[in-house]
Image (cartoon, coloured by chain):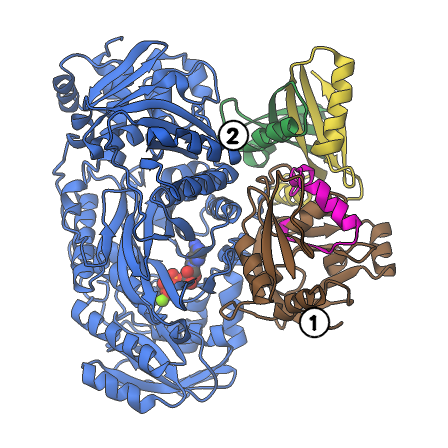
Chain colours: A brown, B blue, C yellow, D green
Amino acid sequence: MKAALVLFPGTNRETDMSDALRRAGAEVVTAWHRDRELPAADLVVLPGGFSHGDYLRCGAMAARAPVMAPIVESAGRGVPVLGVCNGFQILIEAGLLPGALLRNAGLRFVCRTVHLRLERRCRLSGHLDVGDVIRVPVAHGDGNYFADSDLAARLEDEDRVVFRYVPDGRGAGNPNGSTGDIAGIINRAGNVLGMMPHPEDATGPRQQSRDALPFFQGIVESLS
Amino acid sequence: MNAVLPDIAARHGFTADEYAKILDHMGREPNLTELGIFSAMWSEHCSYKSSRRWLKALASNAPWVICGPGENAGVVDIGDGLAAVFKMESHNHPSFIEPFQGAATGVGGIMRDVFTMGARPVALLDVLRFGSPSHPRTRHLVSGVVSGIGSYGNCTGVPTVGGQTTFHASCNGNNLVNAMCVGIAPADRIFYAAASQPGAPVIYVGSKTGRDGIHGASMASTGFDDEAEAKRPTVQVGDPFTEKLLLEACLELMASESIIAIQDMGAAGLTSSAVEMAARGGTGIDLDLDAVPQRETGMTAYEMMLSESQERMLMVIHEHALEHARGIFEKWDLDCAPIGRITTTGRLVVTMNGRIEADIAIGPLAHEAPLYERPWTLPEPRPPVGVPGSPVTVESALITLAGCPDLASRRWIWEQYDHLVMGRTVAPPGGDAAVIELPGDRGLAMTADATPRYCEADPVAGGRQAVAEAWRNLVAVGARPLAVTDCLNFGNPESPAVMGTFVGSVNGIAEASRALAMPVVSGNVSFYNETRGEAVQPAPTIGAIGLIDDLDRMASLAFGGADETIHLIGATSGHLGASLWLREITGEEDGPPPPVDLDAERRTGELVLGLIRDLGLASCHDVSDGGLLVALAEMALASGIGFSVRRPDREVAAHAFWFGEEQGRFVVSSPCAGKAIAAAAHDAGVACTVLGRTGGDVLTVDDGQPISIESVRTVHERWLPDTMAGAGETS
Amino acid sequence: MKVRVHVTLKDGVLDPQGKAIHRALETLGFAGVRDARQGKVIDLELACADEAGAREQVDRMCRQLLANTVIEDYTVEFV
Amino acid sequence: MKVRVHVTLKDGVLDPQGKAIHRALETLGFAGVRDARQGKVIDLELACADEAGAREQVDRMCRQLLANTVIEDYTVEFV
Ligand SMILES: Nc1ncnc2c1ncn2[C@@H]1O[C@H](COP(=O)(O)OP(=O)(O)O)[C@@H](O)[C@H]1O
Ligand SMILES: [Mg+2]
């Protein structure tokens, strides 16, 4: 199974992500933001970071990069696409996922471990089962997923909320004020998943949690 | 060239003697640009004119030191073909004027010092000293500084993994912001800043030059339009995204044989980078300012030479590498311009519009800055305070201390920092030292420490203590301490009392670093941290790194489980002088600090390292601020496991035993190794006492009233968020 | 030609920054603030001299990059 | 009463946001952009009806909170 990691100049979680994908058994190739073609791959991954500094809006400039044309095209053909954190922001700005990501409700960047519950199984939920709660870090300043009431209702009706923040043992839950505690959503066709938390940082033997390893392992197996 | 009047020299901060020296070196009157160049190079910041003489006392060699002070950062061999490159620097004044940008650009500057040497930055630490929490400006400063540091580290993708934060009224008018960066490089590919090859092109890369931070400019404003000057801010704005590009581009270029010398443009920008590179290489340098990428129009040579625009680098590269370098910088969207050549003249020659704007011999600029022998006096030793009676119970003192400004949890701070990016953080903030994973199951541990209230009472002991605490924090995670960097923050060196605290601290650091075999490989001095005669408490911050050979044996402060035996290693006598107990419970800031016995310190540390290595302790934590019971409570908080402890002898009063701040102590716990621990301590000649056992969800001290962990957690975790509530960023 | 673009959050979109400003003003003792909203202002200097053409061009800039029309409105003003 | 406050960086202060917008517009093929600067716009709704009093109050708000006068300028406009 081959995963294409899409790199922008300000991407900074590429090693975290490629480590996680390799741990799960994937082969990793990269694409550069100026590329007009993607390398042949079974999965396209947009990792976290600050793609172009993200001073205007997170992911706004990246979403207009040349590499986005083949990504949009691949997504349309049903190729699985995973966007994490800044990758999620880019997918939204590119129109591959609906809604918007606003400044965290607390206005501050937040890096901490949160509890995530899988709400539905899909092509990109790996070995996780509905109701599974995993400990995964978040690290973002603009992760406040905003959906107006129509969109929020539609996402629930169409069962497109994949991950939700749930309270941890000490009562801390949603770290950013997102609508409906949404942490990750999928497109209608079921092949483009965007999420704010960083499952890639919960896969290594020495990381604070390994809960997300089955997530990657399942994805890699299903695409092998 | 226009000659300069002596009063303009005075406004550049030169004394009459200094100006006479300049005339002597030049053999004529300098023009304004030349005077500006001298003022930058001979400033306290660049020339260390008050401190140089004393810094010589610091030991900087050891077999594992690859490069000591004098380069952009210190370099230490960490085995397996790798080197750690690290340094700490202050950005105090800018952070007080504009906390967000001041702190952000402080982080940017120290990162450049590290990747200039060929290392990829892998961790940042920040040491913050603010005024009293109730001072009207404090919350604004905390909020801005913390988000500034976060914004820069988070965007560049370097985890901020540790630091120190203190509050004291002496910082009401001058907060201190010290940033430390640690990088990793191949040990045989370190890049230096000695421009050795005449004829080689000098290239400028990174952001364009603007009129940022030209301090001298306002002093010399007679030559300029006064009104324009008044509007011109001296605060630099950071651009972390450009820094990220610069970092990646430089590392990419460093993979080839292209670079002869490289130096970031930090304080005094183009001037100091050009002069220092030529001085180290024993060469000269010609610069053509017309070729410098510029953000603004109509800049003068003076302004360009002194601009402190951020995110810029100067390099000397091989002629044949020019095209290769251009290609890389283009890929990363960065300006890259040849702006001069290395020469054999030994002179700095600056031209603009075909005119020579400056022509100065490098030697005097770089090496002959004035050197001052400032008068100094040490403070009178404070008489001991003994054991004052306690107005409160031990339990209630613990609750007060756990939630006091200097001991409350720093989670509110480090959760604003991406401390996990890169995926290598194995010990995140909150422990004794942070640890980053290295290849081969090894770990790099780091910490930053100083106790200003000790340094104020006794600078020599305070200097020793800062090094000893850093040593202990490394030992507590199971790391072999390797080397230190320092950041020495003091008031006005022209005051003998301030100068005395500096001299004493440096001597204490020198002694301790020798005794503990932790050479000082880099550092920074920041004087004039004072407002209207009120100086900050002396703050000689020590940053230190250590190595963990086997991460499976890394220790942490969280108890491993219930039913572990808790041992105290090291001796306790109940020293309350200069302690937090005294300050927080009785309101007194008095008495001498606890003495530091460096020999005992070393024996104790080595014993603990051996215990961690050979017995795999369940937990280990050093005892520092707040004393023994605070250390125990921190271990309970980290694990959610309670304890019952009893003081072994009743000779020492309870509050003195539990809150005294004797040095050289650790608390360790283990399910079954009790005997082996006692035996090893006995063999090492180190005191070792069983305090009690872990278990339950309450803390019981001397069979008194149990306190729940949760009640301690609440006061510990709430103080900072509650204090900061509503001080939101509005940008 | 100078153009000023205002990008503001649509009504109904939560504005955490505006809310924080509102709260902070109250904390500072400014009474009588009913509402606060924060947006962006982008000042452009264009080479082109023809206003109609510029207007059309800036409109495209806004839709393609400067504003996220899912959550933001924009206005263009020639100065 | 509605008040619009503009907060912009002083001339000469590096504007990373403006720089990024400028570059992005160029990348998107918009030719002829000479400069781009980004600032903030803050819209306030005040209870007070007297303009002179409001002006003085908003001025204090700007100096105390809304603008960072070390690097930013502000203007106040009644709408
Ligand atoms: N400004 C800061 N940034 C990041 N981490 C911090 C900061 N201040 C304190 N910390 C972290 O909080 C914990 C407690 O700090 P401190 O009391 O100084 O520890 P110690 O007593 O072991 O030196 C440490 O893990 C430290 O790294
Ligand atoms: Mg410690």
Mark 2: give few (<14), some (14-19) or many (20+) Cα within 10 Å. Answer: some
Q: Label 1 belongs to which residue?
A: A127
- Residue B414: % across, % down: 49, 57
Side of A132 relative to B466 (left or right): right
Image quadrant holding the N terminus of chain B, namely top left
Tags 1 and 2 touching, CB below 8 Å: no
Q: Label 2 belongs to which residue?
A: D69
Q: Residue at x 51, y 71 (%)?
A: A205
The quadrant of the picture showing ligand 1 is: bottom left
Above or below, B653 against A43 in this view is: below
- Residue B19: % across, % down: 17, 20
Viewer-nearest residue: D5 or B381:
D5
Q: Which residues are magenta?
A: A57-86
Identify which amino acid the numbered label 2 is placed on: Thr
Question: Element type at marker 1?
Answer: loop
Mark 1: give few (<14), some (14-19) or many (20+) Cα within 10 Å. Answer: some
Identify which amino acid the numbered label 1 is placed on: His
